[in-house]
């Protein structure tokens, strides 16, 4: 086997271990999860887990960090339509908002939040993971998109950071209330209606001033 193939195999195995670990930690919680079960979930031998990640605590941190990074990447991808929103900005904003709500309510995201909430006292460094790959990073990326729309006259968001913060609050606040903090499933049509309502309210505050439109 070539060195590049061996390296690729090691990366794939590490990824499988991290995904298996997240699945087990999400299902069992940190205290009840065991490395043998994680190895079984990942399809590797128990010693292989220790070869890649030295102990259970290290495995937990890396699994949560990988899951948080993947969740952020998905949300950043959901913002991409705002780079070229076309003629119907409200419709594009609604589609983006809907995509963000769907990502926020998927099983993996809910499991990640439960782990962060339940284990942060045991692992205070989870707060750093939450900052690096959490709402702050998403809000900054959204603010950048809104700033660009303001420069082209599509919005009047004089403070894009605040505008991004308020749009996310309009989405996540009602969602958390209706889903009872992620314990109740919200049907997709209801997510679409939440997105529509949030965008409508957002544009009343930050949309272009039609009185100044020629």
Image (cartoon, grey):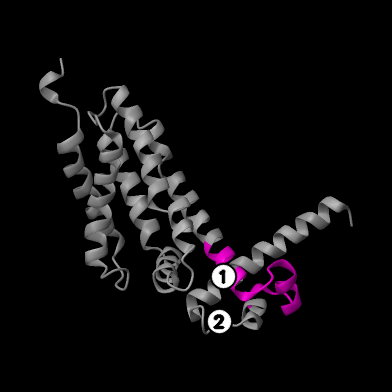
Query: Along the horizontal axis of the image, is 89 left or right of 48?
Result: left
Residue in the image at 51% along x and 78% along y: 30
- Could you say where residue 154 lies in the image, as x and y percent from the top left? 26, 27
**Where the N terminus falls, by quadrant?**
bottom right
Residue in the image at 54% along x and 73% along y: 23
- The answer to which quarter of the image holds residue 95 is top left
The answer to whether the residue labelled 2 contacts the one labelled 1, judged by CB atoms less than 8 Å apart, is yes
Residue nearest the viewer, comparing 96 with 115: 115
- In what element is the residue under mark 1? helix
Toward the right, the furthest residue is 1
Toward the top, the furthest residue is 214
Is 45 in the magenta? yes
State which region is magenta: 41-64
Per the model, the C-alpha gap separating discs 2 and 1 is 10 Å
Residue in the image at 69% along x and 74% along y: 43
Residue nearest the viewer, comparing 66 with 100: 66
| Helix, strand or loop for the magenta stretch, by majority | helix
Residue nearest the viewer, comparing 90 with 166: 166
Q: Name the residue under label 2.
A: 33
**Where the C terminus falls, by quadrant?**
top left
- Could you say where residue 5 lies in the image, as x and y percent from the top left? 82, 54
Residue in the image at 55% along x and 81% along y: 33
Q: Name the residue under label 1.
A: 60
């Amino acid at each position: 086997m070539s060195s590049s193939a061996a390296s690729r195999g090691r990366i794939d195995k590490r990824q499988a271990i991290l995904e298996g670990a997240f699945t087990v930690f999400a299902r069992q919680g940190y205290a009840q999860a065991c490395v043998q079960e994680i190895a079984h979930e990942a399809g590797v031998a128990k010693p292989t887990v220790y070869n890649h990640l030295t102990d259970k605590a290290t495995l937990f941190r890396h699994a949560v960090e990988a899951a948080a990074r993947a969740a952020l990447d998905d949300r950043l991808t959901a913002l991409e339509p705002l780079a070229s929103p076309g003629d119907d900005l409200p419709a594009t904003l609604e589609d983006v908002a809907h995509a963000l709500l769907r990502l926020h309510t998927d099983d993996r995201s809910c499991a990640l939040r439960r782990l962060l909430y339940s284990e942060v006292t045991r692992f205070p460094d989870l707060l750093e993971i939450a900052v690096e790959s959490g709402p702050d990073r998403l809000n900054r990326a959204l603010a950048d998109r809104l700033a660009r729309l303001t420069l082209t006259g599509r919005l009047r968001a004089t403070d894009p950071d605040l505008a991004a913060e308020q749009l996310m609050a309009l989405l996540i606040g009602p969602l958390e209330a209706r889903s009872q903090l992620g314990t109740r499933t919200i049907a997709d049509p209801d997510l679409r209606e939440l997105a529509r309502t949030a965008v409508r309210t957002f544009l009343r505050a930050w949309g272009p001033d039609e009185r100044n439109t020629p």
